[in-house]
C-alpha cells in the first residue's frame, strides 16, 4: 500500500532547511547549497513495513517567501510541518513564532485542527548558543508543538528520528 505524506519545512533563511532535506533524502551534507528560491521539492520513498510504503514529499520553502500570500499555496494539504531555527541565531528562534502563526492562520487539516508541527533546534554541533533549553521547552508548550529536539543536520544527529516521529504521529505508517 502507498501513502502520500506531505511534509513542510519552514523557518528563517540560513537555519538549515535545505541541508535537512538533502541530508534526509540524498544522505549527504555539504556547505555549498545555493539559497533556495521559490520552493524545492523532494520525494523519498520510505519502506515503513512489509506492506506499507510511504511517499514522503518534502517541501522546502524559501525563506524569502515568508509571510506573503505565496505560503498559502505551499501549505495546502500538508500532513505535518517542521519549523526549524538556528540555536546560534536568536532572531530565528523569535521568528519561529511568526512561522507558526502564519501556518496556523492559513492552513489546517480536513477536520479543522491545526497541522502537527515539530520544532527543530538546529546546529547543536556549534558551541555558541543564543537560546537555552528552558525557553525552547516553554515556547513549545505554549505554541502547541507536538515536540522539539536539538538536531545537527551537519552531523546527522536526530534527523532520521525526527522524521519517524512525525510520520508516526500522523499514523501514516499504520
Ligand atoms: P536554509 O536557508 O534554511 O535552507 O539553510 P541551508 O540549508 O541553506 O543552510 C544554511 C547554512 O547553514 C549552510 O552554510 C549550511 O552548511 C549550514 N548548516 C546547516 N545545518 C547545519 C548544522 O547542523 N550545523 C552547522 N554548523 N551548520 C549547518
Ligand atoms: Mg534553503
Image (cartoon, rainbow, N blue to C red):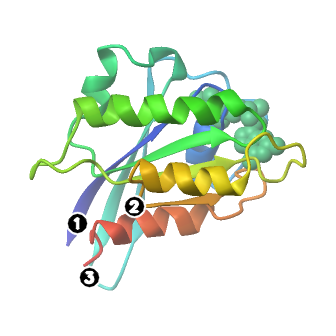
The residue sitting at 58% across, 38% down in the picture is 17
Label 1: few (<14), some (14–19) or many (≥20) C-alpha neighbours in 10 Å: some
Label 3: few (<14), some (14–19) or many (≥20) C-alpha neighbours in 10 Å: few
Residue at the far bottom in the pictured view: 50
The answer to whether any part of residue 25 appears in the image is no
Location of the C terminus (image quadrant)? bottom left
Helix or strand or loop: what does disc 2 sit on? strand
Residue 95 to residue 64: above or below? below
The foreground one among 57 and 109 is 109
Count numbered badges in the picture: 3
The foreground one among 41 and 125 is 125
The residue sitting at 25% across, 25% down in the picture is 73
Instruction: Specify whether 86 is left or right of 36.
Output: right
Identify the residue under disc 1.
2
**First reached walking from the N terminus: tag 2 or tag 3:** 2
Instruction: Specify whether 151 is left or right of 73.
Output: right
Identify the residue under disc 2.
45
Helix or strand or loop: what does disc 3 sit on? loop
Residue 131 to residue 27: above or below? above
Q: Position of residue 151 (x, y in %)?
A: 68, 56
The answer to whether any part of residue 12 appears in the image is yes
Residue at the far left in the pictured view: 111
Q: Which mark is residue 51?
A: 3
Q: Quadrant of residue 14?
A: top right
Residue 106 to residue 114: above or below? above
Amino acid at each position: 500500500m502507498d501513502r502520500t505524506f506531505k511534509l513542510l519545512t519552514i523557518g528563517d533563511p540560513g537555519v538549515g532547511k535545505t541541508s535537512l532535506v538533502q541530508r534526509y533524502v540524498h544522505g549527504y551534507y555539504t556547505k555549498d547549497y545555493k539559497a533556495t528560491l521559490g520552493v524545492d521539492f523532494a520525494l523519498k520513498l520510505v519502506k515503513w513495513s512489509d506492506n506499507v510504503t510511504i511517499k514522503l514529499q518534502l517541501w522546502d520553502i524559501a525563506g524569502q517567501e515568508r509571510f506573503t500570500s505565496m505560503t498559502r499555496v505551499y501549505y495546502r494539504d500538508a500532513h505535518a510541518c517542521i519549523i526549524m531555527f538556528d540555536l546560534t541565531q536568536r532572531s530565528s528562534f523569535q521568528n519561529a513564532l511568526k512561522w507558526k502563526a502564519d501556518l496556523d492562520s492559513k492552513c489546517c487539516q480536513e477536520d479543522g485542527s491545526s497541522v502537527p508541527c515539530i520544532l527543530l533546534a538546529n546546529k547543536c554541533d556549534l558551541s555558541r548558543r543564543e537560546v537555552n533549553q528552558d525557553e525552547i521547552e516553554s515556547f513549545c508548550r505554549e505554541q502547541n508543538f507536538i515536540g522539539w529536539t536539538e538536531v545537527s543536520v551537519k552531523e546527522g544527529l536526530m534527523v532520521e528520528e525526527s522524521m519517524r516521529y512525525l510520520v508516526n504521529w500522523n499514523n501514516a505508517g499504520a
